[in-house]
Image (tube, rainbow, N blue to C red):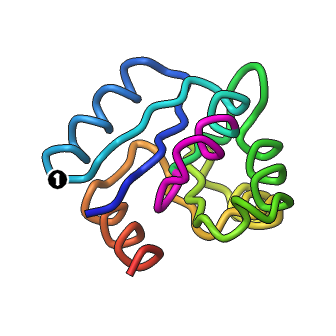
Amino acid sequence: MARILLVEDNEDNRDMLARRLQRKEHEVILAVNGQDGVDKAHSEMPDIILMDMSMPVMDGWEATRLLKADVSTAKIPVIGLSAHALKQDYEKALGAGCDDYEIKPVVLNQLLEKIEKHTA
């Protein structure tokens, strides 16, 4: 299974999604904001990153841009997570470097399909 870096500032969302992914036998590494996510991406080198787009300290758009600009992390797939469902939100996430996008609340089966697609 995949080593997943979950970058999410909301503790309830982070814990719930981490538990659901772990039940599917994924290894989950947690980060609480964009800067923490960038740091852990470099130290842990996960298979994939689930990136909340709206966070304090550093938002998901900036964190993703930094990761994609760095040769050591550029190839790690990033799935943006956001409650914003408009087409321009999706396009903004892809423009920042996200490889895919999932709307919150996350539908686990859809997210698992995207994880599989980007880590296969």
Q: Nearer the viewer, residue 13 or 4?
A: 4
28 over 33 or under it: above or below: below
| Location of residue 112 (image quadrant) | bottom left
> Horizontal and vertical percent for residue 7?
54, 36
Q: Is residue 22 magenta?
A: no
Q: Which amino acid type is shown beneath numbered disc 1? A: Glu
Q: Nearer the viewer, residue 73 or 110?
A: 73
Identified at 66% across, 71% down, the residue is 75
**Quadrant, the N terminus:** bottom left
Q: Secondary structure at mark 1?
A: loop
48 over 12 or under it: above or below: below
Q: Is residue 47 magenta?
A: yes
Q: With 33 as the anchor, is 5 left or right in this view?
A: left
Q: With 28 as the anchor, is 58 left or right in this view?
A: right
Residues shaded magenta: 39-49
Q: Which residue is mark 1?
A: 25
12 over 28 or under it: above or below: above
Identified at 58% across, 66% down, the residue is 77
